[in-house]
Every structure is written in C-alpha cells, then in structure tokens.
C-alpha cells in the first residue's frame, strides 16, 4: 500500500475531493500553510493500493491548476531612504506537490 500526500491549492480542493470520492478513493483533508507564501493550502492524504497510484495522480493533475500568485513578503524587504519597503514578488504555484510513500502497515480498528 502507498500513501499519497498531495499539497494542492484551496481553490482546487473541493472539486478534487468530490472526484476522488466518486472514484471510491478515501481522502483525508488537512488545512495546511505553505512555508514560503505563509498562506493556506490543502494537504490531502490518500491511501491506495500500489497499482492505483498512477490513476490518482492522473486525477490530481486533471483538477489542479497552476496559478500565479503575487505576494508581499515581510521577510524580503529592501531599504529605501531609511524606510523598509516590502518586495512584491510573483510566484507560480503548482498544480500540486505530490509525495508517494510506502505504508509499512495499515489497519482500521
Ligand atoms: P509555499 O511554500 O507557500 O510556496 C508557494 C510557491 O512559492 C511555490 O509553489 C514556489 O513556486 C514558490 N516558492 C517556494 N519557495 C520558494 C523560494 N525559496 N524562493 C522562491 N519561490 C519559492 P509550489 O512549488 O507549487 O509549492 C506549493 C506548496 O507546496 C508550497 O507552498 C508548500 O506548502 C508545498 N511544497 C512544495 N514543495 C514542498 C516540499 N519539497 N516539501 C514540502 N512541501 C512542499
């Protein structure tokens, strides 16, 4: 068995969860926060048999868009005339960031 950990954008999560559930995959949704943007994203835990991993990743790809996000990071500042001016930066936020890990043991009690 494998555990798919997928970090997706909040906007994509509701539809993606619906489609995964319709396809009989169990999903756990966690509210998470990206370390760089410090804004909310969604982490999904999906436990599946090894042969289903590609199908789940295909569904994730289909329902997760890549978007540009503009952020003002307080940690990235420049000093102009003695005044701290925060940098505005534009980043491309995935699609999805996906980890697939082996599950040593799976039990439902
Ligand atoms: P954040 O850490 O908030 O990152 C959001 C986006 O900012 C990233 O999109 C990337 O385009 C950009 N970014 C991140 N760190 C950067 C840096 N040091 N300099 C410049 N730009 C940077 P994604 O790569 O699509 O990542 C989306 C979210 O997925 C991340 O949100 C984070 O929550 C998670 N993530 C990505 N890679 C990860 C990893 N290796 N381990 C754990 N979580 C990860």
Image (cartoon, rainbow, N blue to C red):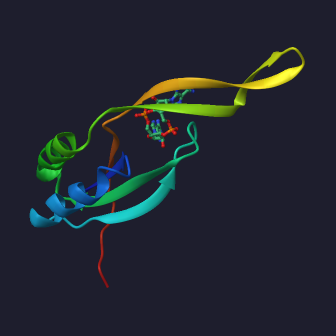
Residue 24 in view: no
| Residue displayed at 30% across by 69% down | 106
Residue 35, position in %: x, y?
58, 41
Q: Is residue 63 left or right of residue 13?
A: left
| Residue displayed at 74% across by 24% down | 77
Residue 13, position in %: x, y?
30, 55
Residue 64, position in %: x, y?
25, 42
Residue 94 in view: yes
Q: Quadrant of the C terminus?
A: bottom left
| Residue displayed at 29% across by 50% down | 12
Extreme residue in the top direction: 81
Q: Quadrant of the N terminus?
A: bottom left
Q: Is residue 42 left or right of residue 60?
A: right
Quarter assignment of residue 108 = bottom left
Residue 95, position in %: x, y?
30, 37
In this view, the residue in front, 2 or 88, is 88
In the image, is residue 3 above or below residue 70?
below
């Amino acid at each position: 068995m494998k555990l798919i950990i997928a970090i997706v954008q909040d906007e994509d999560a509701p539809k993606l969860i619906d489609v995964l559930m319709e396809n009989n995959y169990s999903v756990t949704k966690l509210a998470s926060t990206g370390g760089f943007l410090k804004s909310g994203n969604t982490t999904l835990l999906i436990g599946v048999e090894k042969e289903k991993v590609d199908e789940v990743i295909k569904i994730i790809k289909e329902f997760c868009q890549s978007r540009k996000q503009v952020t003002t990071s307080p940690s990235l500042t420049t000093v102009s005339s003695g005044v701290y001016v925060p940098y505005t930066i534009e980043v491309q936020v995935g699609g999805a960031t996906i980890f697939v890990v082996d599950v040593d043991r799976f039990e439902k009690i």
